Image (spheres, grey):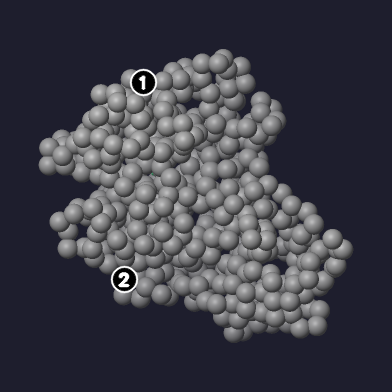
């Protein structure tokens, strides 16, 4: 195909009025469609739902007798909202909870299930009314796949092996008959299996070598018996920058025998500046905005560091890096129950989400699964619920705007991002990714990190003719603007379109905004 170099600019709807001449200086953004990278796996848009606070109970499960509209106990409003963002997979039941979860407590008649404790998260009663069948019903209702975390910390290999047999075998075993008696004769599909959670911490405080010994046993015996639905096993990996687990697991994998295998290595990294988390979710200033963004961008070096170790043992990139806990961890909402990890979600969270997703997309050859923490009512949530009401957060809107990037092919972007400076913090002013979707459409996502200046971009698309840009932009009156039950649409995407007139037109990106456009 003849390569036609077209320079176009795109005009946007500037949401912030005052702009100086310097702010209007345009920045060249280059996209060369003749070059392409790896597939951006839709599984990087995964969710995480732990038995924690109001994440499951109230957030997802209200019970079949509730006045809140539900299907078999699962609230319809939340299902509808999650279907709309095409959630690829949901990680469950934890988190730290997973290493104390005993699956047999969560099957059979609900009124006969035992009440147990949830010592990690507020020490509350765990009623076990949301168990295996309810979770599988939930993922099927939202059109997602199941990512199960098995109990390595306080369970046994036999308990996990039984759970997998109960879920996945079609043979008439005692466990399969029990599954049928509990309402599901057909075997379930399990897409991902986490072998333990944070085994270096709440999952058993194991050294890397101790964990590897457990890993080999669980990876052998927690078998998937459903041949029509392959299952990827994910080993516990690093805690932040420490490469101890990465080295030990990858070295063991390289020297593995026929008797065990894995397909993924987990990485957990939150945007949290102080511990315990002290940064406010609302009512913060520019410094806290910038500090949080700086901490978020550290994900790039974490992914690069662990990918480099993985490359040593696995140059063919067979093992996926699975960032199955990420997101902003902020001070809890004042008055919320201790241990429930409830926090508001602002425009800053939207920017944080976009920056992380961009990093994963740029590393899509290695990062093939990721799960934001967490889905409903907990940490950097997509959705808040209050009794029969439901609210979509700015982070939800980013996930929806990024739908075109699910399974799209990465296209490199050239962008002299410039600098956003405040105090002694210096950050790139802009961040962008581009991709071609399955239907051949070209998409561009640009984040303007600078909370004070509109950015004017001239996009230069090499290798194709573009006449129009159409999509959505997410901006807000202030970086700490939030949606509330009283004002649910303060931060909501607005249509964005621009037409190439002649050769160049500026694309104006509001301060602290995310814009996703199709280049037509
Ligand atoms: O997401 C909250 C907790 O953070 C998870 O349970 C744990 O894995 C991590 O430390």
* Residue 163 on image: x %, y %: 32, 29
**Quick check: is the Cβ at mark 2 less than 8 Å away from ligand 1?**
no
Residue 274 seen in the figure: no
The 10 Å Cα crowd at callout 2, few under 14, some 14 to 19, many 20 or more, is few
Q: What residue do we see at 35% from left, 53% from top?
A: 141
Name the spot of residue 443 as percent of width and height, x first: 65, 64
What is the quadrant of the C terminus in the image?
bottom right
Quarter of the image with the N terminus is bottom right
> Which residue is most to the left?
111
User: Please, what secondary structure does the residue beneath circle 2 have?
Assistant: loop
The label number, if any, that marks residue 157 in the structure image: 1
In this rendering, the answer to whether 205 lies above or below 241 is above
Estimate the spatial distance between the alpha carbons at disc 1 and disc 2, rounded to whole Å.
45 Å
Say if 184 sits above or below 104 in the image: below
Give the left or right position of residue 296, taking residue 26 as reference: left
Q: Quadrant of residue 9?
A: bottom right
The residue that label 2 is drawn on is 485
Task: Identify the residue at horizontal 69%, vertical 27% (top origin).
Answer: 312
Does 8 sit left or right of 267 as displayed? right
> Residue, x 43% and y 29% (percent of image)?
224
């Amino acid at each position: 195909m003849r390569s036609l170099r077209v320079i176009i600019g795109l005009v946007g709807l500037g949401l912030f009025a005052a702009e100086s001449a310097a702010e209007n200086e345009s920045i060249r953004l280059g996209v060369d469609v003749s070059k392409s990278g790896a597939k951006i796996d839709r599984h990087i848009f995964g969710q995480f739902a732990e038995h924690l606070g109001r994440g499951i109970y109230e957030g997802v499960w209200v019970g079949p007798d509730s006045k809140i509209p539900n299907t078999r106990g699962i609230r319809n409003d939340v299902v509808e909202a999650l279907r709309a963002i095409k959630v690829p997979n949901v990680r469950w039941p934890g988190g730290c909870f997973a290493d104390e979860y005993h699956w047999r407590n969560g099957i059979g008649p609900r009124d006969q299930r035992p009440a147990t404790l949830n010592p990690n998260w507020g020490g509350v009663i765990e009623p076990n009314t949301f168990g295996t069948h309810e979770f599988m019903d939930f993922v099927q209702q939202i059109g997602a796949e199941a990512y199960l975390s098995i109990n390595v910390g306080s369970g046994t290999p036999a308990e996990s092996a039984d759970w997998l047999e109960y879920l996945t075998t079609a043979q008439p075993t005692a466990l399969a008959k029990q599954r049928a008696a509990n309402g599901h004769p057909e075997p379930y599909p399990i897409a991902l299996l986490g072998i333990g959670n944070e085994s270096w911490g709440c999952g058993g405080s194991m050294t890397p070598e101790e964990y590897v010994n457990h890993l080999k046993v669980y990876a052998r015996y927690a078998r998937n018996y459903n041949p029509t639905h392959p299952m990827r096993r994910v080993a516990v990996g690093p805690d932040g920058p420490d490469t101890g687990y990465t080295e030990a697991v990858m070295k063991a994998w390289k020297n593995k025998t026929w008797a065990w295998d894995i397909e993924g290595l987990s990485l957990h990294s939150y945007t949290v500046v102080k511990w315990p988390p002290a940064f406010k979710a609302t009512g913060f200033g520019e410094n806290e905005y910038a500090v949080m963004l700086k901490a978020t961008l550290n994900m790039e070096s974490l992914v690069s560091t662990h990918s480099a170790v993985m490359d040593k043992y696995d140059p063919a990139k067979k093992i996926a890096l699975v960032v199955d806990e990420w997101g902003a961890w902020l001070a809890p909402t004042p008055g919320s129950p201790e241990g429930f990890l409830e926090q508001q979600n602002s425009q800053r969270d939207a920017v944080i989400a976009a920056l992380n997703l961009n990093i994963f997309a740029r590393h899509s050859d290695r990062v093939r699964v990721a799960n934001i923490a967490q889905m409903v009512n907990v940490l950097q949530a997509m959705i808040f619920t209050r009794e029969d009401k439901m609210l979509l957060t700015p982070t939800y809107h980013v996930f929806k705007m990024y739908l075109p990037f699910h399974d799209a092919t990465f296209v490199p972007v050239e962008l002299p991002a410039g600098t956003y400076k405040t105090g002694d913090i210096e950050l790139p002013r802009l961040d962008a990714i581009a991709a071609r979707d399955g239907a051949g459409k070209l998409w561009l996502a640009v984040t303007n990190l600078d909370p004070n200046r509109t950015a004017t971009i001239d996009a230069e698309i090499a290798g194709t003719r573009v006449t129009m840009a159409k999509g959505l932009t997410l901006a807000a009156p202030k970086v700490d603007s939030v949606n509330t039950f009283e004002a649910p649409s303060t931060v909501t995407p607005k249509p964005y379109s621009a037409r190439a007139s002649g050769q160049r037109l500026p694309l104006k990106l509001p301060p602290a905004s995310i814009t996703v456009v199709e280049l037509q």
